Amino acid sequence: MNLEFFAIDSQGFITDHERALEDLFGDEETSRKGDACLNVMASRIATVFASLREFPTVRYRAAKSLDASTMTTMRDLIPTKLAAGIWNCLAKHKQSIENFPQTETCELLILDRSIDQIAPIIHEWTYDAMCHDLLNMDGNKYVHVIPSKSGGQPEKKDVLLEEHDPIWLELRHAHIADASERLHDKMTNFLSKNKAAQLQHGKRDGGELSTRDLQKMVQALPQYSEQIDKLSLHVEMNLEFFAIDSQGFITDHERALEDLFGDEETSRKGDACLNVMASRIATVFASLREFPTVRYRAAKSLDASTMTTMRDLIPTKLAAGIWNCLAKHKQSIENFPQTETCELLILDRSIDQIAPIIHEWTYDAMCHDLLNMDGNKYVHVIPSKSGGQPEKKDVLLEEHDPIWLELRHAHIADVSASERLHDKMTNFLSKNKAAQLQHGKRDGGELSTRDLQKMVQALPQYSEQIDKLSLHVEIARKINDLIREQGLRELGQLEQDLVFGDAGMKDVIKYLSTQEEASREGKLRLLMILATIYPEKFEGEKGQNLMK
């Protein structure tokens, strides 16, 4: 019966007037309702100060100065009337409440919506505001979907984002970019001090973990359930972008190609996709504290014979969206650069349509193209030293592996990953007396890569170096075998000649007619390259015959 006000957290309260906006800023005819609303608000606000034993100096914005051309409305008088009502109530409390201060102890500043009419409309970029704006929360209640550890249905759990959660308390007023960065640091720190996590997931010396990896890791540690639940919850809400390595990230738009380059009728989807992409790319720069100069290819110059399409405008629209987001970050993030510190170059697929089709010959590209990897995960088959069944081990080809870091952008043949691996293993074994004794030193004799692999497998005292070298020797050998079996050197040479204009339609027809054992995928790639370079060759009956 005495709930005059309701605390929403330790620093804020409400007096629970859901119709206040309508009563106070509605039609002039409702001024009676407005006066009644102000009287109740004044009484309840005064009750807050009575409960705190504080006697405030009341400050407010006075009504506009009156002159013959100005009419003062009920709305203009709202701050004045509310201040007078609060002061009258406080005067009564001053006389009736024991030990109530007799002089002012603090300040009360009265602001109404007319001070800033845009604030409820514009996007606010704090963690708290983003949660309530984007996540369809019911008050402070968020539905947290927890993956099942047994592979069953995920569990749904209602959680309250309130001050009893110390992570929420710390991050709620932080910019969303700052919150994401701080959460990543918290999870990294939590896992670095947790031996169970290191043993269960394999300690990655010197390796950066992505936020998604960290979320999965903490979910697998039931002995720290309360901390895990809180960290995992907040990280889930901050996955704006995903780092794939120390020099690259993605914003996770699997349908971007379809949404952006589909039919013109889907321009609404395209615009929505661009807005989200712009926001997420801007968040990356906010996290890095970088303010880029945005460079892009402008749409074709307009003339009577040229129709500009949605596709032509993609770089322009994305650049504008990124710039708008960066302008907001510039104003709201502490210590954000005020002048440009780097460059952002926007490129879309129309810049180079052949790149996704043609065979790329780097170690990284060959691994993903030929080895049926699941993301960066490779299944490494380790022969048994006792003659039993070989062991299968999932390994991640990521930056924590120094050999992968060194070789991934090397050409598989010329600056050969295989050749460099051979040198690495030869050098490793030349310094290892145990290997020389066990396998017999071959003075002046060249060792094959397979011999070297067998030799290092027999040296358990150098297990970490052995495992890494042996892994990449196996991968390089497997790739070279597949290149030879699939005749990729001949196909790759023809692809390159086509792109550089050194081969044409006759060479493709000759290849297709003579290399009948070539894979369907290889033939399809060749035709797609041809269609990109010579689209006119695929019109009508010629195109049908080629496809046959």
Image: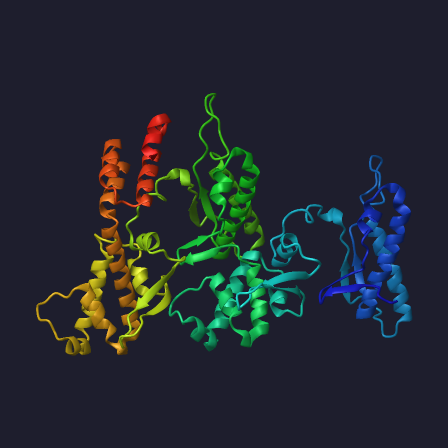
Q: Nearer the viewer, residue 259 or 92?
A: 259
Horizontal arrangement in the rendering, residue 417 relative to residue 283 (left or right): left
Q: Nearer the viewer, residue 32 or 520?
A: 520
Q: Is residue 487 above or below residue 475?
A: above
Horizontal arrangement in the rendering, residue 285 relative to residue 171 (left or right): left
Residue 284 is situated, as x and y percent measured from the top left of the image, at 49, 53
**Residue 511 shows in this picture:** yes
Q: Residue at x 31, y 57 (%)?
A: 408
Residue 299 is situated, as x and y percent measured from the top left of the image, at 46, 32
Residue 111 is situated, as x and y percent measured from the top left of the image, at 76, 53
- Residue furthest to the left in view is 444
Q: Nearer the viewer, residue 348 or 394?
A: 394
Horizontal arrangement in the rendering, residue 519 relative to residue 110 (left or right): left
Q: Nearer the viewer, residue 187 or 534?
A: 534
Question: On the rendered image, what quadrant is the C terminus found in?
Answer: top left
Q: Quadrant of residue 139?
A: bottom right
Q: Is residue 112 above or below residue 157?
A: above
Residue 81 is situated, as x and y percent measured from the top left of the image, at 86, 52
Q: Residue at x 58, y 57 (%)?
A: 175
